[in-house]
Image: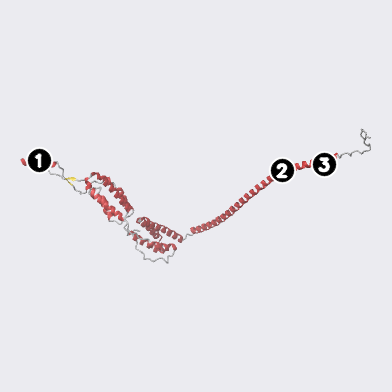
Amino acid sequence: MSSDHPVPVSATTSAAPPRNTSGRLLATLLLFLLLAFAATLWLWHDRVYLPERARIRDALASSDRAYTGLSAEMQTLRQTLAETQTLAAHDQDRLRELETNLETLTAQIANPDTSLEASLVIARIAYLVSIADAALRFERNVPTALMALTASAELLAARGDIAYSALEAALRDDHQRLSAVAAPDTAALARYWAEAGAIEALAWRTTTAVSTTEVEPLAGWQGVVVAIWRDLKSLIEVRELTVTDQALLDPGREPVVRTHLGTEIASLRLALYRRDSANAQASVARVTSLLTTYFVTTDPTVTPLLEALKEIATLELDPALPELDATHTALEYAQRGATDGAPSREPLAADPAL
């Protein structure tokens, strides 16, 4: 028969074992510590280690750059030092050379050498000859060349050294040949025409009327007729032209003629400066024609100009100038000291000009 009451549990049933809570707490604590250590390690790696490592790398890179720059500067300093040492060595060599030259000059001053004095004289003569050559070649200045040759001959004459007799003879020979050249002073002629160019002061030529002589009046009816005829003739003025040039009939042409004359004189001056004989002769002809045609040739302002034109017409403005070959040859021998091989020349007679 079933019973509505529950079956009672036996009192002998065993109870559940107690849980190990201390072990779980220890494990949890250990896990927490591991997690905290891991978090701390991560934070140190991310916030401390990596920035510090980057800073160290930047510092190393900066140190490398600084080292590279210092290395380049050291290399530049080494090169500068080497160049300075080279220059110092060169300066020392130059200083020793100057000291040697100073000792040589001191010895020469203490014991003067005649050859040095002769070399200085020859050098001065060479300079004077070069001046003479340049004056002839570039300026055609004969007086300057003659003065240079004269000064050279005086230097040799004052020295009185027979070893340079060939050079002295060559100087005298070239001086004589150059003195024979009739070279006009074109600069002085050009200055004369510049000062004489007062065109407005020249006397202008004018036409002259025929003078009539007074006649004693006739008596009677013939006197009346002659008087009437004279009155009729007085209505017409009769002039005799002494110059046939039609320009003289126009007084307005005078300024044009004077301007033309000034232009021709300026052309003559230019030809004189350039020693252009052909253009000078053409200008002389044109100026002479203008003066004799339009101006009074007997006037004191015109006559000297015509005389000067006649003188220019007879001059050779560009004569052939001799070369100084003999002097150059003898000077070359003298400069080399080869007096034995110098060209032989007979001594010339003393030139009064020297």
Dot 1 and dot 2 residues touching (CB under 8 Å)? no
Q: What whole-number distance in Å separates the C-alpha atoms at marks 2 and 3?
A: 28 Å
Q: Position of residue 253 (x, y in %)?
A: 25, 45
The residue that mark 2 highlights is: 46
Given the current orientation, which residue lies at the most extreme front position?
1
Q: How is the image coloured?
A: secondary structure
Q: Secondary structure at mark 3?
A: helix
| Left or right for 96, reference 114 | right
Q: Secondary structure at mark 1?
A: helix
The residue that mark 1 highlights is: 228
Q: Secondary structure at mark 2?
A: helix
| Location of the C terminus (image quadrant) | bottom left
Looking at marks 1 and 2 on the same chain, the residue that comes earlier in the sequence is marked by 2
Looking at marks 2 and 3 on the same chain, the residue that comes earlier in the sequence is marked by 3
Q: Can the viewer see residue 263? A: yes
| Left or right for 216, reference 131 | left
The disc labelled 3 sits on which kind of residue?
A: Ala
| Location of the N terminus (image quadrant) | top right
Foreground tag (1 vs 3) = 3
Looking at marks 1 and 3 on the same chain, the residue that comes earlier in the sequence is marked by 3
Closer to us: 335 or 15: 15
The residue that mark 3 highlights is: 27
With respect to residue 204, does 9 lie above or below? above
Closer to us: 39 or 232: 39
The disc labelled 1 sits on which kind of residue?
A: Ile
Please report the residue visible at 66 percent of the width from the left and 48 percent of the height from the top.
Answer: 61
Q: Residues within 10 Å of mark 1 (few under 14, many from 20)?
A: few
Q: Position of residue 103 (x, y in %)?
A: 52, 58
